[in-house]
Amino acid sequence: MKKVLIIGGGFGGIAVAQELQKLRDCKLDITLISKNLHLEYQPALYRIVTGQSPLEACVPLSEIFPNKKLNIVIDTITAIDIRKKRATGLNGKHYDSDFLVIALGSEPAYFHIPGIEKFSFGFTTFEQALRLKKHLHEMFKYCQTHHATKKEKTCRLHFVIAGGGASGVELAGELALYTKKLALQHHIPTSLISIDLIEGAPRILPAFPASVSARVAQRLRVLGINIITEHRMVKENIEQLFMQESAIKTRTVIWTAGTKPNTLYQAIKDLTFNKQGRVMVDTYLQAKKFPGVFILGDGAATQYVGMAQTAIYDGILTAHNIEHTLTRTKKESYKAKRPYYSLPVGQGWAVTLMGPLAFYGTIGWTLRRLADMRYFFSILPPLKAMRAFRKDVKLCEYCEICSPPE
């Protein structure tokens, strides 16, 4: 049996594993290595910060792959030899393969700004989202239970989102509503709360059409978000964010201003990269000059990189080309597939772009939720997929004020 080794339990890795399991004519020994026991559904992580269903952002791999046709290994890969098609785990264990699929995803890019990595909060992982949520509760609880001055309360209830791209906009809309809820529970005037969305470009959502950016900015202002553009951050300390023109007193800076391919890619010998640090691949998504070594998702130098839809498409194509290699049939060339974009901006409102069409408000929100549900139905049995979207499934809150004893 030929061995297929898949490194990464994200969208791309899961897609290729699911597709390979459907093959009947090819007997394969498939191993999926992930550092987590679950898939982190990153499009919903911003909702975990504000207490939504944990099942919507954290899906156990055992539920996605309930049968024994796939080996799931929980390990952190520390080294990869693409010549030998071998990976090495944290404790020195080697994993050999005939086909190597690398789908490591991305990680935050801090652009060497002093203090940002140490003092800011992220929410690119489930653990980070929970940490940020706990911090929000601590800020409100402190203002209620301590004899803090108005100046100190204003500092602790000043929330800054650094980065006006899709992730920053999504979080800003959700945070505007959630902080008002926390203020009510903690008996704190909402007038003390302020939320800033900072973007270095002349407008938020610089990668989107200007008309979309303007419409979303209008929605954010209605929700009470302060939008600050053309301001670049230079450093951060424990209670202050410094920009070129000014400084902001805050205990909460949430970093959404950039990502980069996983640093492990740079440690792999013989790979070639583009200017953005992504791996150069051939027409079949193989690392150049290394047939049988596939690069998927955020690490590959392809069009529309960085989107979940792109990673899923990459995974399906890779599975097909592994099958074509084994059956000695013609492989499929990669053709970039334009994704659709959908940005929620507060509960019940979103903008969804499908080609030249743009849908705003309730229609946009419905289309986004349908897209989320469609993905869950593709990886889970129907009843389990529906359970992830139950409105009464909530994460516990982080202080006794928000979760009084029954």
Image (cartoon, helix red, strand yellow):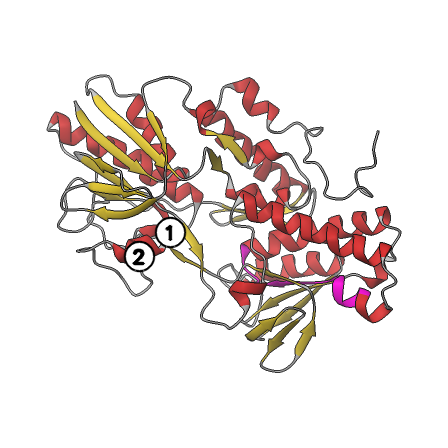
Return the x and y of residue 301 as percentages of the image width and height: 29, 54
Residue lying at the far bottom of the rendered structure: 245
Q: Nearer the viewer, residue 201 or 17?
A: 17
- Left or right, 363 with respect to 155, comes to left
- In terms of depth relative to the viewer, which is nearer, 363 or 289? 289
Residue 45 can be seen in this image: yes
For image coordinates 26% across by 48% down, the residue present is 79
User: What segment is highlighted magenta in the picture?
Assistant: 153-166
- Is residue 162 part of the magenta span, yes or no? yes
In the foreground, 193 or 366? 193
**Residue at (55% x, 37% y) in the render:** 57
Give the SS element for disc 1.
loop
First of labels 2, 1 by sequence position: 2
Tell me the kind of residue under disc 2.
Arg
Spatial CA span between label 2 and label 1: 10 Å
Residue appearing at x 76%, y 60% in the figure = 224
Q: Which residue is mark 1?
A: 305
Q: Nearer the viewer, mark 2 or mark 1?
A: 2
**Is residue 345 at all visible to an observer of this figure?**
no
| Residue type at tag 1 | Val
Where is mark 2, residue-wise?
278
Which corner quadrant holds the C terminus?
A: top right
Residue 358 located within the stretch drawn in magenta:
no
Q: Residue at x 61, y 56 (%)?
A: 169
Could you classify mark 2 by the number of other residues whose Cα lies within 10 Å: few (under 14), some (14-19), or many (20 or more)?
many
Residues at circles 2 and 1 in contact by the CB criterion of under 8 Å: yes
Q: Secondary structure at mark 2?
A: loop
